[in-house]
Amino acid sequence: MKILITGDSFAADWSGDYPGWPNLLEKDYQVTNLAQAGCSEYKIRQQLECDLKKYDRIIVCHTSNSRIPVEHNPLHRNDPLHKECDFLYADVKGRIPSVTEFYEKYYHHDFWEYTYDLIVTDIVEHTLGHNTLHITFFDHKHSLIDMNLHTVFKNYPGTVNHLSDKGNQIVYNKVLDWIKK
């Protein structure tokens, strides 16, 4: 079975002391993982510009609705995992004063949430007709996202895909249940 994974750092191919849930899937399936740490919803949509018919299952790991796409992030130039990282307030706060000021004074939450919803809808429409699972680890509700794993993230934080070994096992089992349906 061929599986495509797209998304942010919760789905990226991390190296660490234990395998992440995407790496666990690779033991049993042929996995193409295009997920990139720090990726905005806009860039996740771009990851899906491939031949989706080549895959038996598609997993889209949706990101925060407040992540803003940028062409270059000066914080992660030499970090292979985060080299394409977009802006998120928690990442830039106090580190890039002009961006921090933007988030604190000018960021229009309703606009960015609306834009996020439009992109999520576009992603869902783009993957219609393909066996696709839409997941997120962020604490926001979206009617088109199938599985919200925020409680797993909060209860089992760690260093690989932001999850502990047990957290990655839990996500792996939930995804495996979906694959086997």
Image (cartoon, rainbow, N blue to C red):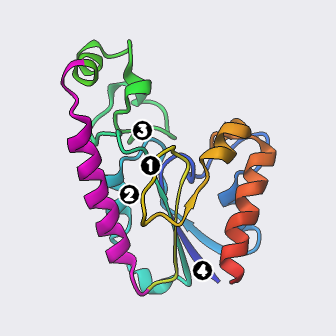
Compute the Cα span from label 3 to label 2.
15 Å
Question: Where does label 1 land, which residue?
Answer: 63
Give SS at disc 2.
helix
Q: Give, as a three-letter code, the residue at label 4.
A: Lys
Asked if the stretch drawn in magenta spans residue 111, the answer is: yes
Depth check, mark 3 against mark 4: the one in front is 4
Asked if the stretch drawn in magenta spans residue 161, the answer is: no
Say which label, 3 or 1, has the lower sequence index: 1
* Tag 4 and tag 2, C-beta contact below 8 Å: no
| Place of residue 157 in the rendered image (x, y in percent of width and height, measured from the top left) | 70, 36
Q: Give, as a three-letter code, the residue at label 1.
A: Thr
Q: Give, as a three-letter code, the residue at label 2.
A: Ile
Query: Is any part of residue 71 visible from this angle?
Result: no
Give SS at disc 4.
strand
Say which label, 1 or 2, has the lower sequence index: 2
Depth check, mark 1 against mark 4: the one in front is 1
Relative side of 7 to 126, left or right: right
Q: Which residues are magenta?
A: 105-129
* Tag 3 and tag 4, C-beta contact below 8 Å: no
Quadrant for residue 164, please give it.
Answer: top right
Magenta span: helix, strand or loop, mainly? helix
Question: Where does label 2 land, which residue?
Answer: 44
Say which label, 3 or 4, has the lower sequence index: 4
Depth check, mark 3 against mark 2: the one in front is 2
Quarter of the image with the N terminus is bottom right
Q: Which mark is residue 2?
A: 4
Compute the Cα span from label 3 to label 1.
17 Å
Say which label, 4 or 2, has the lower sequence index: 4
**Which residue: 61% across, 52% down?**
149
Relative side of 46 to 25, left or right: left
Above or below, 103 relative to 174: above
